[in-house]
Image (tube, grey):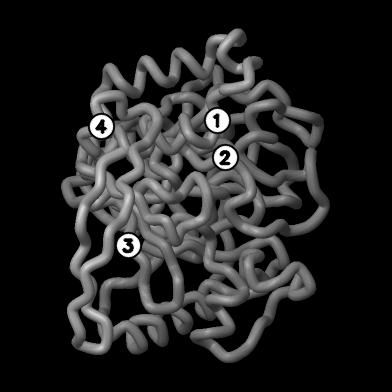
Amino acid sequence: MKTLSILITLLTIPVIISAQEIFHPADTNQDNKLSKQEFDTYNQAWQNKQTWNNSNKIKMDDVTRAGYLFSFGEDYYFDGNEIENLQWKSKRGIITNSIGMNFVYIFPGTFIMGSPSDEPGRDSDETQHEVTLTKGYFIQTTEVTQGQWKTIMGNNPSHFSACGDNCPVENITWNDAQNFIEKLNQKEKTDKYRLPTEAEWEYAARAGSTAALPNGQMIETGCGYDENMDEMGWYCGNTDNTQPVAQKRPNDRWIFDMHGNVWEFCQDWFGEYPVDSVVDPVGPGSGQYRVLRGGSWRSPGANSSRSASRHSISSKSVYDNVGLRLV
């Protein structure tokens, strides 16, 4: 640790306080930045069973956080007011709005959208094609919660309202989601909030992975136990209703519940994929149904929660396993 002085302005009166700078345990040279070598060494130490079983075992959450910090390649800082494991933050990575919605930055890039023909549980509408996103964007780290919805809309339509304010809002239409976005934009004095495009959603969900899930392949595509799916989200194999957000493992972009809990609206009309490479796709110009992504607690099976899995819904339909996440 090293001591630093922080200038705080409180009621316009400057006060100098002394604080302790706490480095992430993977940051061996204590420079507030994680190199690839530091992350790889820390990750390997976590995977070593001897290290895992001893009294100084490395927490999986700390490894995940190290991956998040390394992925941004920017300086990080320690926030002592944050909950454990979220205290180390990228100086660019996460922003929070006035009602407590957290958003993480996703860098531009190119990826293969869709699924390979041999992926268990795949559907024929998941044709693989190359997608390039030329603009970075912020995506919400969790699904919109009931508490956030109530703050903006003044009501809670959720079937599982007893689950609490930290559970995802559901029982809403795509049109309801648009009304929420309009009012949120008004409150925040911006026009930036919207639903993600289908391509933005999958790019963020994959977090660099080409497997069915960001933490690996899926073996059980029904409601039986699947180790990777159980680690990433809530599905018919481990729950029979919605659950509070951010209880399962985040992906390497520090995004929670992209797989399971509730389906998530996308902005696009549902349509067939192209076979050629595309840049910044926004889906068909018109259609009958909107895109849903992510699967839910009531999915037909774990296969619906794969990164490539697609579903569609009428703009006026309401289900207790459908919610939203914003960009």
Upstream in sequence: badge 2 or badge 1: 1
Q: What number is the disc on residue 249?
A: 2
Seen at 61% across and 10% down, the residue is 49
Quadrant the N terminus occupies: top left
Q: What number is the disc on residue 155?
A: none
**Circle 1: residue type:** Met
**Circle 3: residue type:** Ile
Seen at 58% across and 91% down, the residue is 154
Q: Is residue 157 above or below residue 39?
A: below
Q: CA distance from mark 3 to mark 4?
A: 24 Å
**Circle 4: residue type:** Gln
On the question of residue 289 being in view, the answer is no
Viewer-side label of 4, 1: 4
Viewer-side label of 1, 3: 1
Q: Secondary structure at mark 3?
A: strand
Seen at 34% across and 23% down, the residue is 39
Q: Quadrant of residue 67?
A: top left
Task: Look at the numbered discs 2 and 3 and tell me whether their residues touch, using CB distance below 8 Å.
Answer: no
Q: What number is the disc on residue 30?
A: 4
Upstream in sequence: badge 1 or badge 3: 1
- Can you identify the residue that label 1 sits on? 60
Quadrant the C terminus occupies: bottom left
